[in-house]
Amino acid sequence: MLELYYFHGATCGLKARLALAEKGVDYTHKVVDRPYLRTREYKELNPNGVVPTLLHRGTVLIESSIIMDYVDEAFDGPELKPDLPLNRARMAMWLKNADDVYLPSLGTVTYTVSMRHKILEKSEVERKKYLDGIPAMAARERRRLALEMGFESPNFAPALLELDRMLDDMETALGRHEWLADATYSLADAALSPFVERLDELSFAAMWEDSRPAVTDWWDRVKTRESYDQVLGATPNPERPQHTEKGSKAWARINEILTRH
């Protein structure tokens, strides 16, 4: 039996779900909410208190990029890694950057633009409990600064610019190949799609539509794939309307930061 724990709209959950959809693998959807991630029951599966978590024949796997790699290796279906060693290395670098650079950057941007107001509505005790429940110290500090300082957090502009550089690097890569790492769709494309999806949800599509034609074309092609329809067409992010509203209001400030740098 294969089970995947995730919640709708979770960036890393989307990475794993897209890989499973591309492989054509059936699995049991264990859809949870954010509060459940902090329970003892869930932390016995995933001590980090995040999604996704994959259960396969009694074995627990965590970390989205590891899950994606495992799914590609363990199951039949289209190969999601390039044939050439150099392109495999390029794919691996996309997955590493997604985990190490793009994810914390996207978290900072998302929470500052769209989620901060809800947490600020909580009492001081509730806000402290919320922050204390974030297991990773670095993530907890980023979230604290986002809550206390908003757009003025020292992390905000650098996070936004990292995502802008991500799009720059994608534009360059797509000048070499039809897809990010090769002539065919790979785990790199599955890994980066949720990041562009979130920027799209935030109404930040001008970041690529105005000046990055290769990324614009890539994104249009991603959205026509069956995997995208299975994952996001059937179950769109329930927070998308909120992201769109808040992102639209913030766009002038976002654009000013991007233009200034």
Image (cartoon, grey):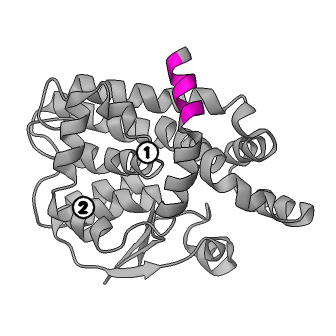
Q: Position of residue 21 (x, y in %)?
A: 22, 66
Q: Earlier in the sequence, mark 1 or mark 2?
A: 1
- Find the magenta span and give its range: 252-259
How many residues crowd mark 1 within 10 Å: few (<14), some (14–19), many (20+)? many
Report the disc number at residue 228.
Answer: 2
Q: Position of residue 199 (x, y in %)?
A: 43, 45
Judge left or right: residue 240 versus residue 184. Answer: right
Q: Is residue 41 visible?
A: yes
Q: Position of residue 103 (x, y in %)?
A: 50, 44
Mark 1 and 2 residues: CB-CB less than 8 Å, in contact? no
- Give me the residue at 16% from left, 24% from top: 175
Pick the front one: 201 or 19: 201
The N terminus lies in quadrant: bottom left
Name the residue beneath numbered marker 1.
199
Q: Quadrant of residue 95?
A: top left
- Residue 76 in the image: above or below residue 109: below
Q: Quadrant of residue 20?
A: bottom left
Report the disc number at residue 104.
Answer: none
- Residue 61 in the image: above or below residue 99: below
Mark 1: which amino acid?
Answer: Leu
- Residue 190 in the image: above or below residue 174: below
Q: CA distance from mark 1 to mark 2?
A: 16 Å
For discs 1 and 2, the disc positioned in front in the rendered view: 1
Magenta span includes 253: yes
Please tell me whether mark 2 sits on a helix, a strand or a loop: helix
- Residue 179 in the image: above or below residue 67: above
Please tell me whether mark 1 sits on a helix, a strand or a loop: helix
Mark 2: which amino acid?
Answer: Tyr
- Give me the residue at 79% from left, 57% from top: 120
